[in-house]
Image (tube, rainbow, N blue to C red):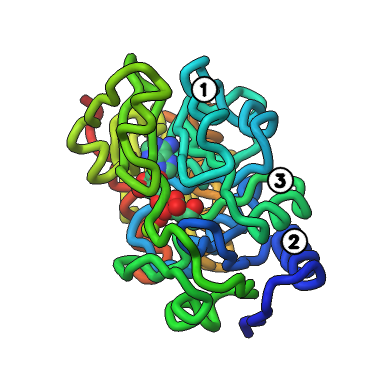
Amino acid sequence: MTILASADSGSIARAAEILREGGLVAFPTETVYGLGADATSAWAVARIYDAKGRPSFNPLIAHVANIAAARREAELPEAAIKLAEAFWPGPLTIVAPAAPGGSVCELARAGLPSVALRIPDHPVARALIEALGRPVAAPSANRSGHVSPVTAAHVAEDLSGRVDMILDGGRTTAGLESTIVSFCDAEPTLLRPGAVAREKIEKVLGARLAAPERAEIMAPGMTASHYAPNARLRLEAHEVGAGEAALDFGGRLTALAAPGAIALDLSPKGDLVEAAANLFAYLRELDARGADKVAVAHIPERGLGEAINDRLRRAAAPKV
Ligand code: TXA
Ligand code: MG
């Protein structure tokens, strides 16, 4: 059931409570409506991908309350701070290396070593982030492949029944997504043109924005900088070979593994949202425990299974 509420202090407090419990809340920003979840919880973030019907785990923007919060999440170079001071709150997203003590979970970053941050310029969005007291991960609040919503009615058309609450704050003003600038390479790079014009950004930087590598702009979730495990993965396994660890789904491989073998089950009860929430952590754990060959169970290609399989196929591909 989706609660549709006009945004006021009472409904915003309720929305923050829903987020704290791992729920999904669509909320207005100055650009488009966002589909929000607690950015520090892989469980909550997995539900975003599920609700959107995304075929892969695209990295999400973490919306923060202030520059101090942004600095806790990312290593922001001087030039990024300049942009933040000039354009935040506002429709600019800054991508930078994730800070060691940062709280945005790996699933929200889609396994990347970087994190995307912005402070939205909308009273409802800001009140919600402040009430939660944590970063809010939010892609645009539309089903994958649909256009970004600028009214609560658009959100309801796409996501009614798939989110816990929609906060109605009227029509958004920009209607165009935020401009995304990355500080992960030698020069600041324009990853996505958006509501802040390139010229304005270049003026503040006193420098030109570089163009991204083609692959990166088309599919930032697919770049080589993604975390890839050291272990060799064998997908669609029906048994666990000698010396293999198991990455299971639904308990079948675990039952077949030799006693003492490493066996991690993405979801013993066969829940794809749970499996997505555990995926990155379990790949890391396999490495940490020294697994060098891993038998991976069949994951059904429905719902979040498509994104999980996409990620596993990349992780299994020969390394270059
Ligand atoms: O205006 C906006 O930006 C809206 C509102 C809700 O804030 N959000 C939005 O989110 O447009 P979404 O998920 O539709 O687009 C976010 C973009 C994606 O293209 C994603 O690939 C990119 O940000 N992105 C996020 N993290 C990234 C990272 N670490 N590196 C490169 N690109 C990243
Ligand atoms: Mg979008």
Q: Position of residue 146 (x, y in %)?
A: 32, 70
Q: Is residue 292 above or below residue 147?
A: above
Q: Is residue 294 at all visible to an observer of this figure?
A: no
Mark 3 or 1, nearer chain start: 1
Amino acid carrying mark 2 in the image: Ala
Q: Which residue is label 2 attached to?
A: 16
User: What residue is rendered at 62% in x and 51% in y?
Assistant: 136
Which of disc 2 and disc 1 is earlier in sequence?
2
Instruction: First in sequence, mark 3 or 2: give its number.
Output: 2
Residue beneath disc 3: 134
Which secondary structure lies at badge 3?
loop
Picture coordinates of residue 247, whole percent (x, y):
47, 48
Residue 38's tag is none
Please state which amino acid type lies under the numbered disc 3.
Arg
Q: Which mark is residue 82?
A: 1
Q: CA distance from mark 3 to mark 2?
A: 10 Å
Element assignment for label 1 = helix
